[in-house]
Structure formats: C-alpha cells, structure tokens
Image (spheres, rainbow, N blue to C red):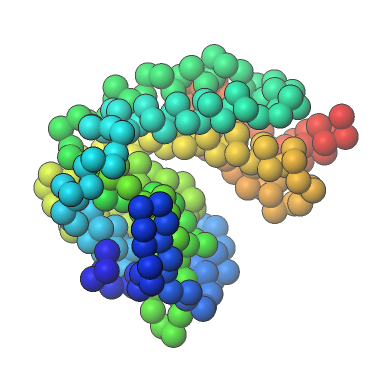
Amino acid sequence: MRNLSHVPPFLAEGPYFYSEKYISGNSLDSIYADFTPIARSDIETIVKNIVDVARIKSSTLRHRQPWSNNQEFFLFQINNTISALHRQSRRIPTWRKAFGIDWATVAVLDELPRQVSQNRPLCLIHGDRHKNNMIRSNGTLYFIDWEYGCIGDLAYELAFHIHQMKYNDTDLTYLLACLRQLLPPKLLSALNDIDVYMKYIALRSVMYYMRVLQECAYTARTCEKFYLRLHELAKYSEFDTKDYSLEEVKTMVKALKMT
C-alpha cells in the first residue's frame, strides 16, 4: 500500500490500528451530485486504484482472514447484517413492517453466496469506496479511510462502489469498460457477479437508512437517499417489495417518526 499512487502516506501502524496523513481538500460528494456526469479522468483514476490494489500480492495476510473463498466471504457479510438486524431497537420492526420487509425478505440473502464464482481468487479490496472517501487535493484524487480494507471478493468491492456512487448510465458503462480492459483475466469474472452482491447491498442499505431515519432528526436529503435505496431494492423481484414514490416515502417516514 505504501507505494500506491493516490493513497495518503501511512504515518504509523500496529496490530490493531493504523494512521494516515490527513488530506485537506474536497470530497467527491461535494463535487458530484448523484447521477450527474463524472470526469472521465476521475473514473479512470478510480479504476486504476481498484485494479492496482487488487494486484497487490496478499499471501502474507492470509492468516488474518476468517474466510477462504468468495462464498465464505459473502456469508460473513450476510451474517454480520443479520446480527445487526437482531440488535436494532424495538421500533425498527415497525418500520420494516410498514415498508413490507420481513424475515422472509431477509431470508432471500441465504441463496446469494452460492451464485458467485468460487474460481475467482480473493484479493485486496478497500471495502468502503464511496464519494466521501475520495478527496481532491491540489488537483490529485486521493483514496482515504482504509480501515475496512481486507482480502475479499472484488465483485463485492465493485458492487458496493457502484451502489454508493450513483453513476449515471453513461458513466457506469465507461467504468465497466475500463475495468474490463485493465483487470487481470483471473479477476474478470467479478464483473459477472456484481448484480448478485447488489441485491444484498440494496437490502443492507435500506436497513441502514431506516435506522438513521428512526434514530436521527428528519431531513429531506436522508429521506431521498432512503427512497433511492427502496427503489433499487424493488428492482429485484426476489424481495417482493413495493416501488414507492418519493412522496409516499416522505409521508410514511413522517408518520412513523410520530409514533
């Protein structure tokens, strides 16, 4: 990691911590609104960093991962999510019921790990690659906050990034074309498994924003983000959830916060 471009210098590290140089600048979240065009040069830099990280030899870190293949990695993520659902406050089940999300909906996740390729090797991933973890400083785009970095499935890395970035169709097509061109052959199958992970990430993200809206003060922007996640979840017929309008979501959230 020390020799990667566009990564802040590491200042110190230990068995359970690391620190990186503070980068002062503007996050991509403050530069690009959701679904607005992103500079080709920024997309190319993002792709290059993803590929460069995935190419790093990670054999010396194998002892630090609790999974040995993509299916086990996926199961670990799902089990973490289900554990978090069990720990949520008593009011959250009321929210889930209101939006038609029950344990049968969550049970759909059990089938997903078997759908991803087991022939693709695990590789190093950032694990939290979203707009607020990309900082432009003095003309350079930096990738920060590597605490979720691990040896994992590249398909998860790509799915999470695409879900969070909210690329428009043109930019998403360009991103995938760049990845197809630069990824080593052994990792190309990750592109075929993005949608499998997107199903999981869509449900996880709905649950995350549901908790934020329940626990924090209402804001229109958070409600809109929640609506977008519900809209994405509704695209997957396995979950059997309704595709609400933004106004319906706002009305329901306000009513639930008053109960």
Rendered image quadrant of residue 109: top left
Q: Indicate whether 200 appears above or below 217.
A: above
The residue nearer to you, when weighing 153 against 40, is 153
Total labels: the figure holds 0
Point 40% across, 61% down: residue: 18
Determine the image quadrant of residue 14: bottom left
> Which one is nearer the viewer's eye here, 129 or 150?
150
Residue at the far bottom: name it: 138
* Residue 43 visible to an observer of this rendering: no
- Percent x, y of residue 190: 25, 41
Residue sticking out furthest to the top:
104
Q: Judge left or right: residue 177 versus residue 205.
A: left
Q: At which x and y percent is residue 11?
A: 38, 72
Q: Position of residue 52 (x, y in %)?
A: 22, 61
Front one among 230 and 96: 96
- Picture residue at 11% right of the left edge, 47% below the top: 185
Asked whether the viewer can see residue 159, the reply is yes
The C terminus - image quarter: top right
Q: Residue at x 84, y 33 (%)?
A: 255
The quadrant of the image that shows the N terminus is: bottom left
Q: Residue furthest right?
A: 258
As drawn, is 31 to the left or to the right of 162?
A: right
Q: Position of residue 132 (x, y in %)?
A: 52, 62
Q: Is residue 110 left or right of residue 180?
A: right
* Residue 72 versus residue 162 in the image, above or below: above
> Quarter-wise, where is residue 119 in the image?
top left
Report whether 75 appears left or right of 218: left
Nearer-the-camera pick, 85 or 249: 85
* Extreme-left residue of the structure: 185
The residue at the point 81 percent across, 32 percent down is 256
